[in-house]
Image: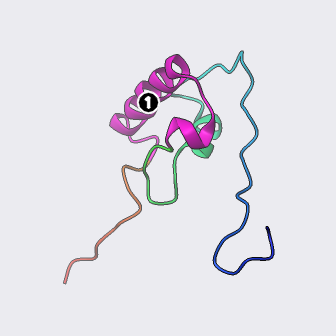
Amino acid sequence: DADRDGGGLRTRRERPAIDLILDYKDIETLKPFVSEGGRIVPSRVNRLNRKQQRVLQGEIKRARKLALLPISDRHTSLR
């Protein structure tokens, strides 16, 4: 029941298109697959199949190496 306290139904993400083209240069396509903390969202959440998740992982890592995507959101200031 949705009326319970502490629980409830989770809203599922919409399944991405089958012909989803992932490219490390297209940051707007990659951003939804990276959490606020900078972690790659797992396939059970973003509903990609195993092959798509592998490609996504590689493209995100490549974009991080070229500093197109931040590695994490934790930016510490020098004290």
Please identify the dominant SS of the magenta region.
Answer: helix
**Residue 3 percent coordinates (x, y):** 80, 76
**Residue 51 percent coordinates (x, y):** 51, 17
| Rendering quarter of residue 4 | bottom right
- Mark 1, residue position: 57
Q: Residues within 10 Å of mark 1 (few under 14, many from 20)?
A: many
For the view shown, which residue lies furthest in the front direction?
A: 1
Between 48 and 6, the residue placed more toward the observer is: 6
User: Secondary structure under badge 1?
Assistant: helix
Colour setup of the view = rainbow
Residue 3 in magenta stretch? no
**Does 37 sit above or below residue 24?**
below
Give the extent of the magenta segment: 42-69
In the picture, measured across the screen, residue 10 lies left or right of residue 37, that is right
Q: Amino acid at mark 1?
A: Gln
Between 35 and 46, the residue placed more toward the observer is: 46
Q: Residue at x 60, y 28 (%)?
A: 48
Please state, as top left, top right, bottom left or bottom right, where the C terminus lies in the image. bottom left
Please state, as top left, top right, bottom left or bottom right, where the N terminus lies in the image. bottom right
In the picture, measured across the screen, residue 40 lies left or right of residue 28, that is left
**Does 16 sit above or below residue 7?**
above
In the picture, measured across the screen, residue 5 lies left or right of residue 54, that is right
Q: Residue at x 76, y 39 (%)?
A: 14
**Residue 34 percent coordinates (x, y):** 52, 46
Between 2 and 57, the residue placed more toward the observer is: 2
